[in-house]
Amino acid sequence: MTQPRAYKTRGIVLRARNLGEADKIVTLFTTEYGKVDAVAKGVRRTKSHLAGRLEFAGEALLTMHRGRNLDVIVSADLSRANWTGIVEPEAFAATNVIIEIVDTLCEREMPLPEVYDLLSNAISAIAAAEKPLTLLPRFELRLLSVLGLAPPTDTCVRCGKKLTICHPEERSVSKDALAWLDVESGGIAGSECRERWRNALELDAEDLVNFTALAAPRGEGAALLARPRVAEAIDLLVSHHLGRKPRADAHMAEFVR
């Protein structure tokens, strides 16, 4: 069946680039169509009705027309304007990181409503947070989990055996690590499979419990903040799946400073 030429969708602005003298190509993450590129005609003109409604990380209800190569944004009504919150340096840095990760890991025209909700809520939380950068590990691990890329936290990536995880209060006096991060395999290995000659990030009992809680959906024993080694482990996993460190990471310290 022929698709209707005009359609409506809700979308978050990931990025934009100039086109011609007054237009822009805007990359959107939408609820029904996933990641799409669309033309905002005349948006760079002062009197454009779209000006101010397609800002970075803004969320809008969009009316679109299908085009031969690129769809055209006809109208945009803001549903969430987060700009006043994310304009602060630390919040801006954190927002750039999460949007870059979503933009890189999510394929075009693949609807992922759970990722959309996750991104939308994360931007709003960052805009309202006193320490926005502390929210990154939770978002990154939840995103990997939704995309099926997060490692299991209860089995060894090497041998498949159960990892020894106990509640922090029940942990023995021993300071030996219970697991280590195998970045190349994209998972966690138990102490029996640890390769002693490799420089690996060690995770103890509290780290494993925290890692599991960060990956959990809201209301299912979820944790909001990451322990230092867990945050480092998540950062390494994200870089592994991106094939590089997020470019926004390189500028984060400068943004915050």
Image (cartoon, helix red, strand yellow):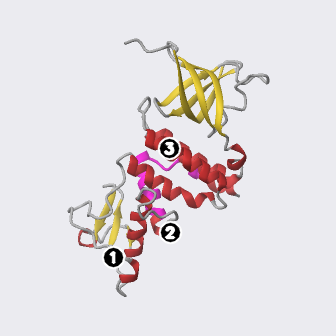
Q: Amino acid at mark 1?
A: Cys
Q: Earlier in the sequence, mark 2 or mark 3?
A: 3
Where in the figure is residue 79, as x and y percent of width and height? 63, 37
Q: Is residue 106 above or below residue 148?
A: above
Is residue 125 in the magenta section?
A: no
Q: Residue 45 got which mark?
A: none
Which residue reaches farthest front? 219
Q: Amino acid at mark 3?
A: Asp
Drawn side of residue 162 relative to residue 206, left or right: left
Chief secondary structure of the magenta span?
A: helix
Q: Determine whether label 2 and label 1 are within 8 Å by CB.
A: no
Q: Is residue 119 visible?
A: yes
Q: Which residue is mark 3?
A: 117
Q: Earlier in the sequence, mark 2 or mark 1?
A: 1
Q: Residue 166 got which mark?
A: 1
Q: Is residue 112 above or below residue 239?
A: above
Mark 2 Cα-neighbour bin, 10 Å: few <14, some 14–19, many ≥20:
few
Drawn side of residue 141 relative to residue 134, left or right: left
Q: Residue 228 got which mark?
A: 2
Q: Residue at 28% across / 73% down in the picture? A: 164
Q: Residue at 70% across / 52% down in the picture? A: 89
Q: CA distance from mark 2 to mark 1?
A: 19 Å
Where's the N terminus, which quadrant?
Answer: top left
Q: Determine whether label 1 and label 3 are within 8 Å by CB.
A: no
Callout 1 secondary element: loop
Q: Which residues are magenta?
A: 231-250
